[in-house]
Image: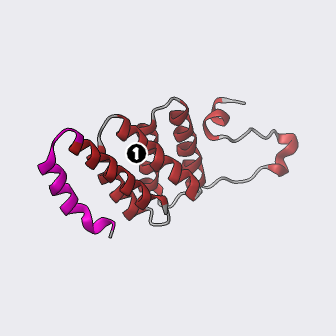
Amino acid sequence: MDQFGQLTGFAYVGSKNYRQRKEVGDRQMLALIFSNRYDQLTKESELKEATAALYRAYLLIGDLPFTVNTWENAVNNYVVALEKEKQSPDALYALARFAEVFPKIKKINALQYSIYIHWTQTLVQNKNYAQGYRDRRGRADLFS
């Protein structure tokens, strides 16, 4: 497969099989490029960068022909990366934004709840009671 094929996932069709060729639209091409970029970054464990690439693709060309499962995986991977870096507030903010942009993803609310509980437990373990109380009061409406 040539370099273009490796980048896009399309294979070259020679003149002998010319009738098998199909036109590829711009949106389709961009979706394939971003999808391949997302896959590559995910394989390299660059989860935040992979999700950022997917989100930039969404901003650039709108609702991509990715499955909801792809978006769910991206959201999960991004949140896991933030949690590993102990950035629970950032994870909660990102999930709130994802919920606005991708309302079809049902797992977001469960992830928010899980991270909120984990973060609150961390604050209590660190004896940061005032911050934990403020956050509990400020976020109580999210899960009621």
Residue tagged 1: 79
Residue toward you, 31 or 2: 31
User: Residue at horizontal 37%, vertical 57%?
Assistant: 113
Query: Residue type at mark 1?
Result: Val
Q: Is residue 111 left or right of residue 33?
A: left
* 13 drawn magenta: no
Q: Depth check: give the residue in front, 99 or 142.
A: 142
Residue 137 in the image, given as x and y percentages of width and height = 19, 62
In the rendered view, tell whether residue 28 sits above or below residue 3.
below
Q: In the image, 27: left or right of 118?
A: right
Q: Which residues are magenta?
A: 125-143
Q: Badge 1, how many Cα within 10 Å: few under 14, some, many 20+?
A: many
Residue 123 position within the rendered picture, expressed as x and y whole percent measured from the top left: 22, 44
Q: Secondary structure at mark 1?
A: helix
- Residue drawn 41% across the image and 49% down it: 56
Q: Residue at x 82, y 50 (%)?
A: 20
Q: Residue at x 22, y 58 (%)?
A: 136
